[in-house]
Image (cartoon, grey):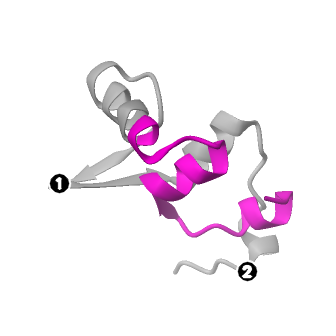
Amino acid sequence: MTHTELTDLPPTISVEEAGAILGLSRPSAYAAAGRYIETGEGLPVLKFGRRLRVPTPQFLSMLGVEPRAEAEAGAGYE
């Protein structure tokens, strides 16, 4: 995945999508998400009931990728 593709990701992505980017199997991605919930280490996730979502800004930070500036990305949240 290119830098542009990474910085163009939506605000949250699925555990499966994050795992695929990292080259992890589905079970390994969910195990890393579970570790994050239990210990704060692993794949960062937000939990909405039974649904888990990976916040893109934290994910990019974990990868050492600088997110694009809001003005550059055209994200006008008002």
Residue 74: assigned label: 2
Q: Are marks 1 and 2 in contact (CB under 8 Å)?
A: no
Residue drawn at x 65%, y 77% is 75
Q: Residue furthest left?
A: 49
What residue is at 76 percent from the left and 36 percent from the top? Answer: 64
Residue sitting at 83 percent across and 65 percent down? 4
Q: Seen in the image, is 8 located left or right of residue 35?
A: right
The residue depicted at 38 percent of the width and 23 percent of the height is: 40
Structural crowding at the residue carrying mark 2, measured as other residues with C-alpha within 10 Å and reported as few (<14), some (14–19) or many (≥20): few
Question: Horizontal and vertical percent for residue 29?
Answer: 45, 40
> Mark 2: which amino acid?
Gly
Total tally of numbered discs in the picture? 2
Vertical side of 42 occupied by 19: above or below: below
Residue 50: which disc?
Answer: 1
Choose top left, top right, bottom left or bottom right for residue 7. bottom right
In the rendered structure, the answer to whether residue 29 lies left or right of residue 72 reads: left
Q: Nearer the viewer, residue 40 or 18?
A: 18
Which of discs 1 and 2 lies nearer the camera? The answer is 1
The kind of residue on which mark 1 rests is Arg
Image location of residue 34, percent across then percent down: 31, 32
Can you say which quadrant of the picture contains the N terminus?
Answer: bottom right
Please tell me whether mark 2 sits on a helix, a strand or a loop.
Answer: loop
The magenta stretch is: 1-29
Neighbourhood count class around disc 1 (C-alpha, 10 Å): few under 14, some 14–19, many 20 upward: few
Q: Is residue 15 magenta?
A: yes
Q: What separation in Å lies between label 1 and label 2 (alpha carbons)?
A: 32 Å
Lower position in the chain sequence, tag 1 or tag 2: 1
Q: Is residue 7 magenta?
A: yes
**Badge number at residue 38:** none
In the picture, measured across the screen, residue 54 lies left or right of residue 3, that is: left
Q: Quadrant of residue 53?
A: bottom left
Secondary structure at numbered mark 1 = loop
